[in-house]
Amino acid sequence: MADAGSKLSQTAALLEAAIEEEQFAADHLLSRNRYRDWENCSLRIGAMRRVHRDLLAELG
């Protein structure tokens, strides 16, 4: 089970990095007044945050 916990922990860390990158992209899109692209990016960030939250809850 420790191996599964380790993989979940690694996945959570990778997901956290992906969220940061997506947030950077969203900020850039917003600064360029690309609102539709920004909205799509924001939706992806929300979905990733929910999965990240669930992974952290699973890790305890």
Image: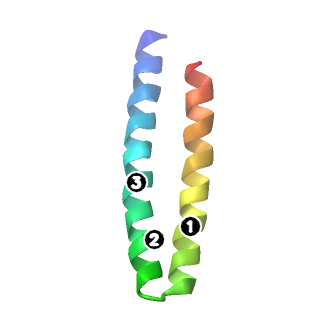
Q: Is residue 3 above or below residue 34?
A: above
Query: Between marks 1 and 2, how big is the CA–CA gap?
Result: 7 Å
Q: Position of residue 30 (x, y in %)?
A: 47, 80
Query: Between marks 3 and 2, how big is the CA–CA gap?
Result: 10 Å
**Which kind of residue does numbered mark 3 sit on?**
Glu
Write the residue at 41% across / 15% down.
3
Instruction: Tell whether label 2 touches label 3 (CB within 8 Å).
Output: no
**In the image shown, does 11 or 39 lie closer to the viewer?**
39
Q: Which residue is mark 1?
A: 42
Q: Residue furthest top?
A: 1
Which quadrant of the rendered structure holds the C terminus? top right
| Disc on the earlier residue, 3 or 2 | 3
Q: Is residue 37 above or below residue 21?
A: below
Q: How many marks?
A: 3
| Disc on the earlier residue, 1 or 2 | 2
Helix, strand or loop at mark 2:
helix
Instruction: Tell whether label 2 touches label 1 (CB within 8 Å).
Output: yes
Q: Position of residue 42 (x, y in %)?
A: 56, 67
Q: Residues within 10 Å of mark 3 (few under 14, many from 20)?
A: few
Q: Residue furthest bottom?
A: 33
Q: Which residue is mark 2?
A: 26
Name the mark on residue 18. Answer: none
Write the residue at 52% across / 77% down.
38
* Quarter residue 12 falls in: top left
Write the residue at 43% across / 71% down.
27
Query: Between marks 1 and 3, how big is the CA–CA gap?
Result: 12 Å
Helix, strand or loop at mark 3:
helix
Q: Residue furthest front?
A: 31
**Which kind of residue does numbered mark 1 sit on?**
Ser
Helix, strand or loop at mark 1:
helix
Q: Which residue is mark 3?
A: 20
| Disc on the earlier residue, 1 or 3 | 3
